Image: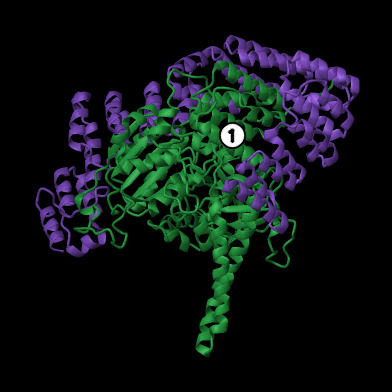
Chain colours: A purple, B green
Amino acid sequence: MCQELRVLNAVRNKNVGILLTYQQLQHLQVPVLIDRLLLQKLYWLAIHICQYLKMPDIEGASRVLAHWACDKVQQSGIEEEQLARAIAEKLGDTPGVSYSEIANKAIECGKVDLAIRLLGCELKAAEQVPLLLKMGRNQLALTKAIESGDTDLVYTVLLNLQERMPRGEFLMSIRTVPVACSLYLQFCREHNRPMLLELYYQEDNFQEEGNTRIADSYEDERFETRVSKLVATQDAFNKAKNECATKLTEEQIRLMRFQRKMEEETNKPFLDLSLHETMYKLIVENNQKGVEQLRKDFKVPDRRFWWMKILALSETGDWNELDRFSKSKKSPIGYEPFVEVCVKNRNFEEAQKYMGRVTPENLVRCYVKLGKLEQAAESALQSKNAEDLNFVLSKCPPSNRALFEKIQTMRNQLGAK
Amino acid sequence: MASHLSSGRINLSVLRESYRQEFLELLDKCKGTKALVWDGALTGPIDLIADYTLLKGHEVDRMWPLQYGRLPSSNVQNIIFITRAKSSLMDIIKDNVTKLDNDRKELHVFFVPRRSLLCEKKLKDLGIYGLFASVEEYSLDIIPIDCDVLSMETELSFRNCYLENDRTSLFLAAKALMTVQALYGVIPNIFSKGDCADEVVDLMMRMRRELGGRDMQVPPQIDNLLILDRIVDPLTPLLTQLTYEGLIDEIFGISNTFAKFPPEKFNASAPGEASSDPKKIKLNSSDELFAEIRDRNFNAVGNVLSRKAKLISAQYDERHAAKTVGEMKQFVSKLPHIQAEKASLGSHTAIAELIKEETDTDEFRASLVATQEFLSGAETDKASPYIEDCIAKQEHLLKVLRLICIQCYCNCGFKPKLLDYYKREIIQTYGYQHLVTLHNLEKVGLLRTQGTVRSYATVRKSLKLLMEDVNEQNPNDISYVYSGYAPLSVRLAQLLHRPGWRGITEVLNVLPGKTREEFQQIPEWLRKRRASGSSVHSSGSEQKVTLVFFLGGVTFAEISALRFLSQMEDAPVDYLIATTKLINGKTWLDSLMDVFQAKPVNPF
């Protein structure tokens, strides 16, 4: 209370001329009193009162300073640079001062340079940027927006610029700014695909052009246009010096043509299956010629070919053909896979036939797959492999006590040696 | 409901409460009865903040999913769309709005976590912006998932940063950290590794300056902040997690603390429950048993479960010992708790059985063996027969990609011939539509050709990533979470405090991205007071707290490893974990995939 009385006393000074009683002050509230002082441009007094009463910055000192600065801005006859310095000095880094407000004032007075300098002190990018745009300072607005990390703000600038500038100029201005570029590309990816391709083309970014064309090709419904889009894709990857992608695209075009032919011949769907799936389907349909043609044409590695063949044959239950195939030449994948696919299709009898050709180190696993745990254990014991025995044990259900204990004994035998 | 959030070192229920208040205030601004139209990605996360019962109390009568078509008719006075700021969702909103009856409902939009100029412009372009009575922003930046875990649940943060050069998620991460500091105090020490992490630190410093001194009100509860880029350690999420919670996520997927399981092994709890619906279970620390087993290596879980079964049995038997009425009464009062424990035991036993079915398969074991070989650096420069067979058998593409990326990392990149070979194998087997995905993986660096620097072996040795003789039952090192491999990211966190990163500058230089240390000033009167002569056996409130923020995602196994560090004797700090998203190898790689569906081809 004492403090407030002191304040009242001060404003009763004849230079100020505000006569208030204590009750009136309580009713009005201090900020209003400060307002009155500001109107009279009694800044020094106002600030002192704020500090004396320990008002929080936002209500007190900062507001006064902002008001003073706005006023100062309107002063004519002083050079803008001087003004800027004077204001910056006075305000310093006082928290809560909105430089953008002052800058706005400066713009209104036509003092654009001053405004820019003041904006340089503004910390909040969200306030800085729109004003910079208003003043036509595009590059600076963009830079500041990017500095702030606020992508939304960057988009504000970009879209604004896109509307205002002719296309060529706009693209030139963002070319040198990678972040702006990426964001604009993202925007185009969702809203303006043709522009996307053009941008990549401009940047000589053939790799991304290729990727985009692939995506586009899947949007197409007509076979011939899809293929032509892929040809353009192949071209792009070639320019990007991406040999692998070029080759794979070329193969895809070849595959699609083959699949189309198959569809016409057999009236069954083939398009957009992978090469592997296509061959699988042909085996199931017993189209030996087609399979062989694809295998040669696309240089399918032996390993993969064998797996595919035995999976297809076992799925269709063509055990005779499987057997014949297994004898056609030495299997590049061994004979355990044969056991595996038979078991997978629940034909244990067939699986048994291949056991003789299984390599010793895989015997245990194959016996286990067949469910012949005892034989598996014996085999492991023979080869003195404790690890394998443990494996067999882990597959033995504890409910089968007799077998469980038997295998345990075997393991102990090995352990004892 | 919130008790488990407040049981940690830092009371996270305060954060949740703050978000809850904000949401309810936004709701209350729309006067009258309301229907909420939900963007599917937000239902889970916001449910963790404010569930339906709470919302009903604020006049929310109806909840509908955001989808194309006509909204169901109703008598509500307000329709509120709650959505992420995604351009494509604006189209759905337009569809809903234009098909509405003309019955004077008030329309609102809440953008989560930020409004976006692009979306508002889109709404204007679609001609419906003027129809909304209000357009608000609900800044839900980071959600408390459990007492020591916070997640932003932003799906595509890694993809956005590394594939598309879009820094939005970094900005949001910095904002989230500012929110945390607003409630728990400015964090004095900041450490970061990685270029994106470095940017987040820059943004944080900038945001602090913009606040202009208005943040100095809360005494700091967190001592250190460590921000890690996912790209500093891309290997860990690719590996198959072997902790209980990790395996649940790998096999069944955990989403906003819920997981769904095939129902056969579970007893139907409610009489009306259809037995063919998947069983949905909530997994957080409010379930005592879960809290006990979640971080353990799966092989140690069986023992804990059987011990618990015996304990519960014994507790039930106590009823025989109760002779007096007083003792009986005591027993009866404990009964609900024992029954809850028994139900929990039942659930987790069933879950463990389901997990075992998967981990016992040959495929699972073979995959682990192959991974172990890659990790040890064996034969990583040749095409792996195991991977080739997986491809030939057309095993799931994500499994194959994971393995190839692991091999690539451990080999420090492939010779061009090998990389091309793998790419060809994949395209020929799985289809041309995956070519862009492969290019994405290359762009991000998960698939690459060999450079000049081959650093994996150095890093592995100096950070002791591969540990032999792992004790899964009673581990003494974080490597138990992957049965012999210590997550690189967690090692970095571990070494930060002891002996400090100055001791590993060589390794840090080899890992990608900038290393940084910052210090934020705090006024003297706010600093944490340390009791003079703090004893080791103090109440634990002397323990320092380190918040580890994973940019780009974190796995449950890494969280378990950090918890393990906190619980060790003479641990220097307690860890609090935050991230952009909880991930596993599948979901992480999935976010980098570009899937194309061919339109049915017109035969003409």
Taking the view exactly as shown, the residue that stands out farthest to the bottom is: B324
Residue at the location (53% across, 24% down)?
Answer: B443
Q: Position of residue A16 (x, y in %)?
A: 13, 49
Determine whether the residue tagged by mark 1 lies in a helix, strand or loop.
helix
- Front-most of residues A281 and B24: A281
Measuring 25% from the left and 44% from the top, which residue is drawn there? Answer: A63
- In the depicted structure, whether residue A37 falls above or below residue B588: below
Q: Is residue B1 above or below residue A115?
A: below
Name the foreground residue: A166 vs B61: B61
- Dividing the picture into quadrants, the one containing residue A293 is top right
Numbered disc total: 1
Q: Is residue A17 visible?
A: yes
Position of the C terminus of chain B, as image quadrant, is: top right
| Image location (x, y in percent) of residue A397 | 70, 54
The one of B176 and A157 positioned closer to us in this rendering: B176
Tell me if A11 is positioned left or right of B420 in this view: left
Please tell me which residue lies in front, B401 or B140: B401
Label 1 environment density (alpha carbons within 10 Å; few <14, some 14–19, many ≥20): some
B25 is higher (above) or lower (below) than A257? below
Location of mark 1 (residue): B370
In this image, B517 relative to A296: left or right?
left
Q: Mark 1 belongs to which amino acid?
A: Ala
